[in-house]
Image (spheres, rainbow, N blue to C red):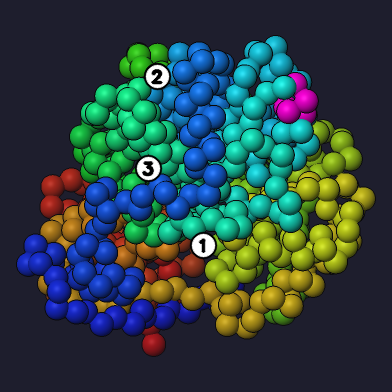
Amino acid sequence: MSMARTIRRRECVVGEDWPDSVPPLLRRVYSARGARDHASARPRLADLLPPDGLLGLDVATALLADAIAGGRHILVVGDFDCDGATACAVAVRGLRMLGATRVSHAVPNRMVHGYGLSPALVDELAALQPDLLVTVDHGIACHAGITAAKAYGWQVLVTDHHLPGESLPPADAIVNPNQRGDGFGSRMLAGVGVIFYVLLALRRKLREAGRLEDGAADLSMLLDLVAVGTVADLVPLDANNRALVSAGLRRLRAGHGCAGLQALIEVSRRRAEVLAAADIGFAIAPRLNAAGRLEDMALGIECLLCDDPTRAHELAAILDGINAERRAVQQQMLGDAEAALSALPDVTASPRAAHCLFHDDWHPGVVGLVASKLKERLHRPVIAFAPGDPGGDTLRGSARSIPGFHVRDALAAVDAAHPGLVERFGGHAMAAGLTLARGHLEAFERAFVDTAEAMLTPDLLQDIIASDGELAAGAFNIHSACALRDGGPWGQGFPEPLFDGEFDVLSWRPVGTQHLKLELGLAGKRLQAIEFGGWTGTPPGARVRIAYRLTPDDYRGGDAIQLVVVHREPAD
């Protein structure tokens, strides 16, 4: 069912302004990603953009400073994904470090409240009698919920990074680098990054007012959480985000992360001392996200706020179990989706530009993962829908996109052309969410596919694997593998190094039911390789061309390396 893929090598011109400490292989990789020198390739925390350019920051910090001074109740309202959970933990921990004595938190339950600050959630929060609500990683689209909060007499500070609609909600202050007129130098901050910047500005304000001693409130202690939320939300790792993530990874590698993150590293069987951004994306974030998908993200936030290692490990073990359940649900849903796609005559012969899929038995918390998997296989924008409630009339959809197709803008175009078809939507370029009436699904699918066909060019619909070229035989060693692993952080907008080349297949065997283990030959070297999901029942040929990552082989240890194959095709 996968579309044809093409390997295309990145253009690379390596300059001369590199210190001797940077290996030539890394210079080549950095240069291919547009880095001109070591400073731009590995930005430091000292290179962070100052908060000043963020619109609304003065009003936001004044609200928080007054609430702290007056001992008023600050209620942080999080979101049910990893970015929202880490942002909530950063806000609660940071405000307490800055002198707030009455800080609590809440988070919507996906199945009960839906997304964001809804009127139903506001009514429940009334029992807590807050004075100031602070939204993290949401709020920019929560007009009704914020109106309801204001009717209770509460102040509302929105911190968010999602794209705003035509109008802004009636909050007392909004900090969002993507709102109109904002002059901040990076619009790529995740929700956790936005609240971290608000705390940086608040600390400065309190120091200037003489209410906080210089050196007090070391907010760098929160960077482990900032790193996890930033990587998990798949925002582009521009220089500013790389500086934040690098600093957070250093804390985690040194064993200085919060108890909850250290426990999640342990239950996911990762080694903290060599932790990479990929470990966050594939091991830590899914375990946090699982709580919001199948249960209640309050459990994940409790883990991140816990300072008792024993209790943190108990919570992490529960999250690990929920994640195992999530994997089983996801696999079943993927089977349903693939069966539905296989019944379409045009999936491979004349593929449509986008796909919408729905099943009555799907779980609304897992549709985003299904959409993501299918997007990768089909190289098409995909929206997966599930009933908001079992048997209900409202559908919740989760969209995932491909480079060059701004899915949130596409939803806005559908909404403008067909008013009332979509109940609500929000998101950003690569991911978005929406709700619509069950009876509108067929009309929405036609409108969305038509919009995708109008916006997508043939070039964008080609599934291109961007390669850093060939590796010389002498580069296949543990020094190169470790340099590549540690040269990041790698992620969206600053992709992990990927190479291609032709190899002899010396031996092969299936591993489990899905994976393929290979022994490859190149210039007299015997190289171990693994292709996850690569066993289709058909043996590989005697010679193959592959795209691969070079990594240390943690399973064998020592100086062992392996090639992680992401694409394989017969060699010419």
Which circle's residue, 2 or 3, is located before the other in the chain? 2
Nearer to the camera, 237 or 553: 237
Residue 536 lies in magenta, yes or no? no
Estimate the x, y position of residue 277 in percent, counting from the top left: 35, 48
Q: Residue furthest left?
A: 20
Q: Which residue is mark 2?
A: 99
Q: Which mark is residue 227?
A: 3
Residue 462 seen anywhere in this rendered image of the structure: yes
Q: Residue furthest front?
A: 209
Q: Label 1, label 2: how many angstroms apart (C-alpha)?
A: 58 Å
Please rate how many residues cluster around mark 2, counting C-alpha atoms within 10 Å: few if below 14, some from 14 to 19, many from 20.
Answer: some
Label 1 with label 2: CB-CB less than 8 Å? no
Residue 455: image location, x then y, percent: 69, 76
Q: Nearer the viewer, mark 1 or mark 2?
A: 2
525 left or right, relative to 509 = left
Q: Residue at x 70, y 79 (%)?
A: 349
Mark 1 sits on what residue? 536
Which residue ends up furthest to the bottom in the rendered image?
572
What's under tag 2, amino acid-wise? Answer: Gly
Secondary structure under the numbered disc 1 in the rendered image: loop
Among the two numbered marks 1 and 2 on one chain, the one whose residue lies closer to the N terminus? 2
**Residue segment shown in magenta:** 148-152
Callout 3 crowding tier (Cα within 10 Å): few <14, some 14–19, many ≥20? many
Is 151 in the magenta? Answer: yes
Of the residues tagged 1 and 3, which is closer to the observer?
Answer: 3
Real-space Cα separation, disc 2 to disc 3, in angstroms: 24 Å
Q: Residue at the location (67% across, 59% down)?
A: 408
CA distance for labels 1 and 3? 36 Å
Mark closer to the chain start, 1 or 3: 3
Helix, strand or loop for the magenta stretch, by majority? helix
Q: Observer-nearest residue: 175 or 276?
A: 175
